[in-house]
């Protein structure tokens, strides 16, 4: 985490892993607000594309509605485009399988940069189902709330809506895919000595503090040295 002179903020590269409902979006929104980093959430990118009724949106809608992963080439292209235009980011919901993790590692290595923190938020499935059933999102601000544990402040006008895919049967199916495809990534990042496991059942502030402290530690070096800052560094992948 590098302070940026002259403006209030930090350059950070934080990866948030974890099952549906663990609090990735909640934490990413807070980390982005605190550091000035860009919050890149692949689920939000997917929903925006669907809402815009593009040809691509029509294709990916079917995957989203079934609670299944959108094909890697589509999602990797979406993410790389965002990474190319930002030095400081919190990545939420990507990667979700080994192919995506490999594409991200290649892009990071080619750009000569490192993660400041790779965080796995962990919680048992039953708690996650409860959380997702009570999740509501503000249509005005995009902020994430919960019917009982995380109520909206008075200055968020709402309306507070439930995501179409947050129905119990769909949630269980998404969690199964998480355990099969995404959870093995914890070992993948742990092998590189880069993984911080965090108990996601702790209070929201506690989790944020833990992630920020981890991001302040010197990064674990990858094969390539840290290069000079530059927005073109991901350009090859866009
Ligand atoms: P994810 O992005 O991992 O799917 P969200 O950030 O959308 O998870 O959080 C899921 C639900 O759990 C939301 O309703 C959110 O308000 C709530 N939540 C998130 N973190 C916590 C926490 N530490 N304690 C209690 N509720 C939380
Ligand atoms: P969830 O965490 O419940 O899957 P998200 O908001 O993260 O919700 O994602 C919504 C949908 O977008 C997913 O069900 C999936 O279809 C698609 N999606 C999001 N991220 C990815 C990804 N990295 N790879 C493939 N599909 C994705």
Image: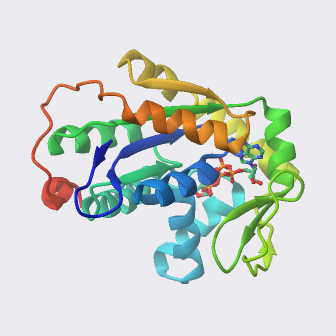
Image quarter where the N terminus lies is top left
Q: Quadrant of residue 9?
A: bottom left
Report the front residue among 210 and 90.
Answer: 210
Q: Which residue: 69% across, 34% down?
A: 200
Number of residue marks = 0
| Side (left or right) of 74 relative to 60 | left
Report the front residue among 115 and 78.
Answer: 115
Report the front residue among 207 and 109.
Answer: 207
Which residue ends up furthest to the front in the rendered image?
6
Question: Can see residue 89?
Answer: yes
**Percent position of residue 159, x then y:** 79, 80
Q: Quadrant of residue 99?
A: top left
Question: Can see residue 41?
Answer: no
| Side (left or right) of 169 relative to 114 | right
**Percent position of residue 27, x then y:** 59, 48
Q: Which residue: 78% across, 48% down?
A: 171
Which colouring convention does the figure follow? rainbow
Q: Which residue: 75% across, 81% down?
A: 157
**Percent position of residue 107, x then y:** 24, 45
- In this rendering, the answer to whether 77 lies above or below 227 is below
**Percent position of residue 120, x then y:** 56, 31
Q: Which residue: 42% across, 54% down?
A: 35
Report the front residue among 51 and 35.
Answer: 35
- In this rendering, the answer to whether 136 lies above or below 154 is above
- In this rendering, the answer to whether 52 lies above or below 214 is below
- In this rendering, the answer to whether 165 lies above or below 187 is below
């Amino acid at each position: 985490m590098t302070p940026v002179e002259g403006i209030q903020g930090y350059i950070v590269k934080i990866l948030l892993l974890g099952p549906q409902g663990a609090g990735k979006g909640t934490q990413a929104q807070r980390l982005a607000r605190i550091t000035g980093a860009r919050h890149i959430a692949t689920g939000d990118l997917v929903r925006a594309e669907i809402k815009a009724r593009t040809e691509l949106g029509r294709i990916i809608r079917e995957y989203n509605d079934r609670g299944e992963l959108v094909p890697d080439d589509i999602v990797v292209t979406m993410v790389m485009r965002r990474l190319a235009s930002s030095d400081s980011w919190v990545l939420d919901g990507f990667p979700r399988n080994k192919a995506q993790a490999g594409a991200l590692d290649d892009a990071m290595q080619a750009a000569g940069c490192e993660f400041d923190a790779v965080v796995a938020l962990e919680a048992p499935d039953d708690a996650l189902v409860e959380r997702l059933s009570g999740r509501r999102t503000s249509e005005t601000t995009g902020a994430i709330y919960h019917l009982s544990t995380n109520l909206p402040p008075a200055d968020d006008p709402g309306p507070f809506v439930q995501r179409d895919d947050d129905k119990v049967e769909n949630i269980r199916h998404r969690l199964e895919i998480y355990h099969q495809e995404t959870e093995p990534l914890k070992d993948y990042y742990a092998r590189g000595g880069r993984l911080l496991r965090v108990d996601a059942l702790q209070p929201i502030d506690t989790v944020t503090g833990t992630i920020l402290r981890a991001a302040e530690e010197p990064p674990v070096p990858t094969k390539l040295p840290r290069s000079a800052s530059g927005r073109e560094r991901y350009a090859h992948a866009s």
